[in-house]
Amino acid sequence: KSGGIHNIFTWLLFLATIFLFLAIIGAGGILFLENYYRDRIYPGVAIGDMDMGGKTINAAQEIVDARHEKISKNGITFFYKQKKVNVPVEIFGNDPDLSRTIIYFDTKKAVQDAYWYGRDSKFLYNIASRIYALISKKQIPMGYTMNEAQVSSILKNGFKEMEDPGQNALLQII
């Protein structure tokens, strides 16, 4: 009988040792990643289609600003069938007072949100968020505000020949 208890105790000690070993390895891995990503965005985090994983805040801001500059220069193009209409992000007038922004992108907030993803809550929730980002990619939306009336006006003018005004319904008595 005492041999059976000794066997059970040996197996429990063996399992406890393995569990402790795995816990130490896991904690070491978490601490290593915490240290490595201290000043970096966690892997699996993207702003739009731009992967930000492993980038510092400054590097991420440069990437987002470069994309923003390209969009500001080229505008945003809308397509419908074979027709396309370009909406400029900014309209410049001869007088600087007449210049205005039609669509404003909050690039700094997007980069900050990407950095804080996986850092802004309780420890276990943060770990779960980081694992989720690794598995399925976390998309951080680019915040924007737009002058809806101005954008609508540009699109209506650009696509006006595509409109089908239809006909009023007629009542015929036969």
Image: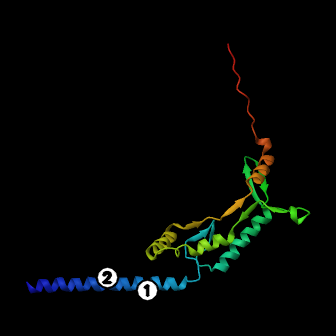
Check disc 2: other Cα within 10 Å, few if <14, some if 14-19, many if 20+. Answer: few
Q: How is the image coloured?
A: rainbow
**Residue shown at 69% from the left, 67% from the top:** 106
Are discs 2 and 1 less than 8 Å apart at CB? Answer: no
Q: Residue type at mark 1?
A: Gly
Q: CA distance from mark 2 to mark 1?
A: 14 Å
Front-lying residue, 174 or 21 = 174
3 to 71, vertically: above or below: below
163 to 15, vertically: above or below: above
Q: On the image, which quarter does residue 67 sit in?
A: bottom right
Question: Residue lying furthest top in this view?
Answer: 174
**Residue shown at 43% from the left, 75% from the top:** 124
**Residue shown at 11% from the left, 86% from the top:** 3
The picture places residue 34, in percent across and down from the top left corner, at 50, 83
Give the side of residue 29 with respect to residue 43, left or right: left
The picture places residue 38, in percent across and down from the top left corner, at 55, 83
Query: Could you tell me which secondary element the residue under label 1 belongs to?
Result: helix
Q: Residue type at mark 2?
A: Phe
Q: Which residue is mark 1?
A: 28
**Residue shown at 38% from the left, 86% from the top:** 24
The picture places residue 52, in percent across and down from the top left corner, at 61, 74
Q: Which residue is mark 2?
A: 19
Front-lying residue, 44 or 111 = 111
Q: Which mark is residue 138?
A: none
Question: Residue lying furthest front in this view?
Answer: 97
171 to 1, vertically: above or below: above
